[in-house]
Amino acid sequence: MKFLDLAKVHIRSGSGGNGCISFRREKYIEFGGPDGGDGGGGGDVWVEAVDGLNTLIDFRYQQHFFADNGRPGMGRQRTGADGKDIVLRVPVGTEILDEDQETLIADVTEVGQRILLAKGGNGGWGNLHFKTSTNQAPRRANPGQEGVERTLWLRLKLIADAGLLGLPNAGKSTFLAATSNARPKIADYPFTTLHPNLGVVGVDGVEFVIADIPGLIAGAHEGRGIGDRFLGHVERCSVLLHLVDGTSETVVEDYRTIIQELDAYGGHLAEKPRVTALNKVDALDDEKRAEVKAALEVEVGRRVLMMSGVSGEGLTEALRALRAEIDEDRLRHKEASSEERETWQP
């Protein structure tokens, strides 16, 4: 299945049915009076997060979603049928944006969550509603309310606990393949990974989800290479694992390139906790390892892990470091939510 994380859709809720102008006419019934029924309500447009989806590919083949209109009212005080609702089923982690692609309307983060995007129009009143003591034969009925028409953007941001960052061929896909059952494409040329991959990894009996995104290069925020459009998939992560190719001749410059792209991307992504790891150390001798690690630690300002996705060296230590940051992030969110409950007042 092809990966698609951005889709444009056109939605329209149903219009309400018109009210009916009718009078009761039966033999031997004098002064029958008005009996026009109300129109039915138009259908609503909803969005719902469902399990089992991880792409917006369905919205490439269908972009228009129109709810049914309400049926008009009829005589004998019969109300028209309501129009059927229509539901857009999306993966968990989908954002609903207005037509400007900037205004956030909704963020669907839980399975089963339903959000109303466009409410259907109300049905019009029949002439029965307008009967008064001074107007016992009203010839008036209301038309149904028009539906709402909107153009929206759906943007998927994968939900993962940890995200992988690095230049192309830094070993991100190899790391994911070595630590999980995911099977991303691996080759010895840049931009082998063309779309995000998810993998479930486990360490010390605890499992969490890691997201692998295509590599960044200098100028990615300007659209170079694949650009930074996939960085949104690691915005929800608790921690970022920054992999640096230990066999590169410019290790420190490679590290700076990614940090500069995170800063240029904006938001709070650059402030997220990061674990930095020197990858492909199986190809380095002891002297070169120490030299490269020391230079990188001076730049990073904290400890740098040594690992190799091919030989398996240091993988467990890296996973434990990620798990510690994830646990700490969950604890912070738990404390923040408890503080909100304590300060809430009716």
Image (spheres, rainbow, N blue to C red):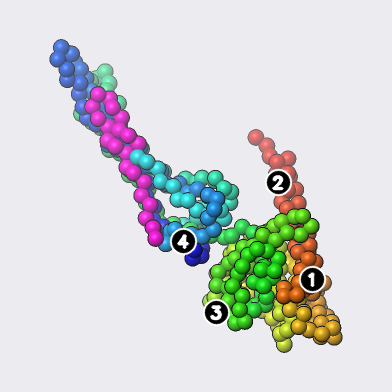
Look at 76% across and 51% down and name the residue there.
331
Around disc 4, counting alpha carbons within 10 Å, would you say few (fewer than 14), some (14 to 19), or many (20 or more)?
some
Q: Mark 2 sits on what residue?
A: 337
Tell me residue 257's x, y (percent). Answer: 66, 79
Is residue 74 rendered magenta in the image?
yes
In contact (CB < 8 Å): disc 4 and disc 2: no
Q: Is residue 234 visible?
A: no
Which label sits on residue 131? none
Camera-near label (2 vs 3) is 3
In whole angstroms, how far apart are the C-alphas of marks 2 and 1?
Answer: 35 Å
Label 3, secondary structure: give it. Answer: loop
Q: Which residues are magenta?
A: 61-82
Question: Mark 2 is on which residue type?
Answer: Ser
Mark 3 vs 1, N-terminal side: 3
Label 2, secondary structure: give it. Answer: helix
Mark 2 vs 3, N-terminal side: 3
Camera-near label (4 vs 2) is 4
Which residue, as the protein is rendered here, is positioned at the far top?
28
Q: Mark 3 sits on what residue?
A: 224
Camera-near label (3 vs 4) is 4
Label 1, secondary structure: give it. Answer: loop
Q: Mark 1 sits on what residue?
A: 314
